[in-house]
Image (spheres, rainbow, N blue to C red):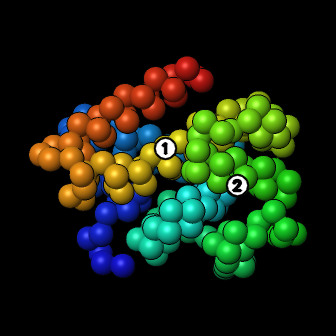
Amino acid sequence: MAADEITSLSLDRHLTAAGAPAASFARLWRGLWAQPYVSAELLELCRLTLARLHRDEGELAAPNPYAPLPAASGERRAVVLSGGVERSTLFSDGERAILAFTETYGLDPQSLTDAQAAQVGQQLGEPGSAQALVAVPPLASARQVRADHGVHGGPYPGDGGVRNFRRLVTAHGRQRRALD
């Protein structure tokens, strides 16, 4: 992976032209990895799940400075990348629920079921469930903005990536405030 390749982990640095929305995204992104309810390791496994689903080699290769995985997690990472989480004993029921939620969200957010959300809630309790349900969309959206919305010369001319990024940050800000 080239050092200047844009990934969800480096997106904020590449969006500085967006001004205040980029700063808002950077705060949201840092806070996502530091909140107390869903571990940074589990969020990283969610990020890798999304990258696997979309065969995003840049994301898969990007080291995450927000979530350095412990040495013992190499096996868990390999299971996530193989798509074998559901059959693995390396994951708790709560981790499996969040990773299944992430996978469904990554494929089609509208296909999420109340049962999936309830399972996450049952495993993490109310604060953890709320954080997990708020954390997955930014993980997916950061990858999507980079991949599909012109941040790296995609389909939109001019400042399309910045314009779409502003919409994304505004939408996530509203979602976040609704849970606070």
Q: Quadrant of the C terminus?
A: top right
Residue for point 20% across, 58% down: 153
- What mark, if any, has residue 99 been given in the picture? 2
Query: 161 left or right of 135?
Result: left
Q: Residue at x 45, y 32 (%)?
A: 172
Coordinates of residue 113 in the picture (x, y in percent): 74, 36
Query: Which residue is under mark 1?
Result: 138
Decide if residue 76 is in sight here: no
The quadrant the N terminus occupies is bottom left
Residue drawn at (85%, 37%) of the image: 122
Question: Looking at the picture, which amino acid does disc 2 mark?
Answer: Leu
- Which quarter of the picture shows residue 121? top right
Q: Amino acid at mark 1?
A: Pro
Count of all numbered marks drawn on residues in the image: 2
* Mark 2 neighbour class, 10 Å CA radius: few under 14, some 14 to 19, many 20 or more: many
Q: Residue furthest left?
A: 158
**In the rendered image of this protein, does residue 151 appear above or below residue 80?**
above
Distance, label 1 to label 2, CA atoms, is: 15 Å
Q: Position of residue 112 (x, y in %)?
A: 68, 38
> Extreme top residue here?
178
Mark 1 Cα-neighbour bin, 10 Å: few <14, some 14–19, many ≥20: many
Q: Earlier in the sequence, mark 1 or mark 2?
A: 2
